[in-house]
Amino acid sequence: MARDQHGLEISTTTDEGARAFDTAITAFLKYRVDLPYTVKALTQADPGFAFGHCLSGLLAMLSYKQTNVAAAAKALQAARAVEHRSNARERAHIKALDLWVGGRMDRALGVWDQIIAEYPTDILAFRLAHFGHFWSGQPQAMRASVDQALPHWAAELPAYGTMLSCKCFAYEECGDYGPAEQAGLKALEIDRGDFWGAHGVAHVMEMQGRHREGIDLLKRLEPHWEGGSNIVHHLWWHRSMFHLERREFDAVLDLYDNKFRNLSSALTSAQPDVYIDVQNAASMLFRLELNGVDVGDRWVEIADKAEARIGDCLSAFTLPHWMMALAATDRDDAANRMLAAMRSHGDATNEPDAIVRAVATPVAEAILAHRKGDYAAAVDMVRPVLDDMVRLGGSHAQQDVLEQMFLSAALRAGRMDDVRLLIDRVRSRHPVAPEQRIGYAEGARRLNS
């Protein structure tokens, strides 16, 4: 039987299929823009290779877009048709895809975790678990996965750098910044174009307030980003976050218009509503406005896309960002339709659906109330779910915009007990004092005056 580049048996019957599988996995790990083409080439190289069809379905689900679920289901059907040729590990992946297509990402994570326990060099299971735990708000699970698998990896294995970059991000999200940065820098030594390694180190520098270092790091690495997917936009967003903390608003807007939300770029034109791009854009505009910056008509194109995605609740963390755009453009009818879809989404006994209903909905309601000037209502909507917002997924740096919204509402409503609640919460969780952070300094000053 053929083996993949990490020594695991794969059930393709052709050398071409084995090579195509390794190429597709590498494109996935390296965030290559040509990933869809490599996966298509894989399914064509060996139509009887169920794992290839499974990978195609997983790629569709990774978009977190409702209209792509049908493509994932079709790929799942193709995999099931030839599943009898698969080994036990591959069948487990197909089971995970089946669960995810059925809306049970929480149970799919359990399958990938079990695969990692039995096959710690299964880089696909590892990376999907890393991804899924992150978007489920489970950083400790991300770290546990790294700690379980990494001791079984040799530095000579092709994806060893990916393991290090995942260690970097998992450790950073758990507040262990020293080992995180060390792992990320090692990943970048192996490959200067390691997007996830650059991403993890940028997060460390963000959390430690090392803004100039972060800007310089990303500038040095940018020449190695050719051929990258939307992760490139997210790295430019990180750079803009460093500029924001330095109050270099013109630099932020320049990065917005010409880098991470450049509407005329080929990448954005091909995929204009990718969830991470929407999060980047909406959260940055919201932060800028909180700091008194006029963002012009930049909200309009996001709001147009938000209206087209009403009822699509696959990405819980993206929903409040869609609401930011609808609220900013006074699209009350669309905002109310979105909230209605969120309140009735799925099955309340299903964990991913419950998060949309119980957490994303009140946060989105608060964003709408904040825009309308009903600040007390915004505070009342968010306060009960402050500790649950992590369940939406996203990093500390990304979740930060929701905390800043709550603080802004509390300040404007004169709710100083809630201001203290938020400032104390941030002070206990972030290594940089709120007095030194652009989104929190005013709240800290008001408490101390």
Image (cartoon, grey):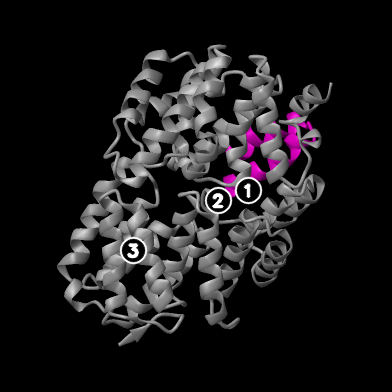
Quadrant including the C terminus: top right
Q: Quadrant of residue 403?
A: top right
In 3D space, how far apart are the residues under numbered discs 2 and 3 (Cα atoms)? 20 Å
Q: Residue shown at 42%/14% (left/top)?
A: 332
Amino acid at circle 1: Leu
In this figure, which residue is indicated by the disc labeled 3?
Answer: 55
Amino acid at circle 3: Leu
60 with respect to 214 (left or right): left
| Residue toward you, 266 or 440 | 440
* Marks 1 and 3, the one that precedes in the sequence: 3
Q: Quadrant of residue 349?
A: top left
Vertical side of 412 occupied by 132: above or below: below
In this figure, which residue is indicated by the disc labeled 1?
Answer: 235
In 3D space, how far apart are the residues under numbered discs 1 and 3 (Cα atoms)? 26 Å
| Residue toward you, 373 or 29 | 373
In this figure, which residue is indicated by the disc labeled 2?
Answer: 231
Q: Residue shown at 58%/45% (left/top)?
A: 233
Q: Secondary structure at mark 1?
A: helix
Q: Quadrant of residue 261?
A: top right
Q: Residues within 10 Å of mark 1 (few under 14, many from 20)?
A: many
Q: Main secondary structure of the magenta part?
A: helix
The part of the chain drawn in magenta is: 231-260
Residues at circles 2 and 3 in contact by the CB criterion of under 8 Å: no
Quadrant including the N terminus: bottom left
Vertical side of 354 occupied by 328: above or below: above
Amino acid at circle 2: Ile
Which residue appears farthest toward the front when viewing the image? 417
Residues at circles 1 and 2 in contact by the CB criterion of under 8 Å: yes
208 with respect to 425 (left or right): right
Residue 246 counted in the magenta span:
yes
Residue 16 point in image, percent of width and height? 33, 78
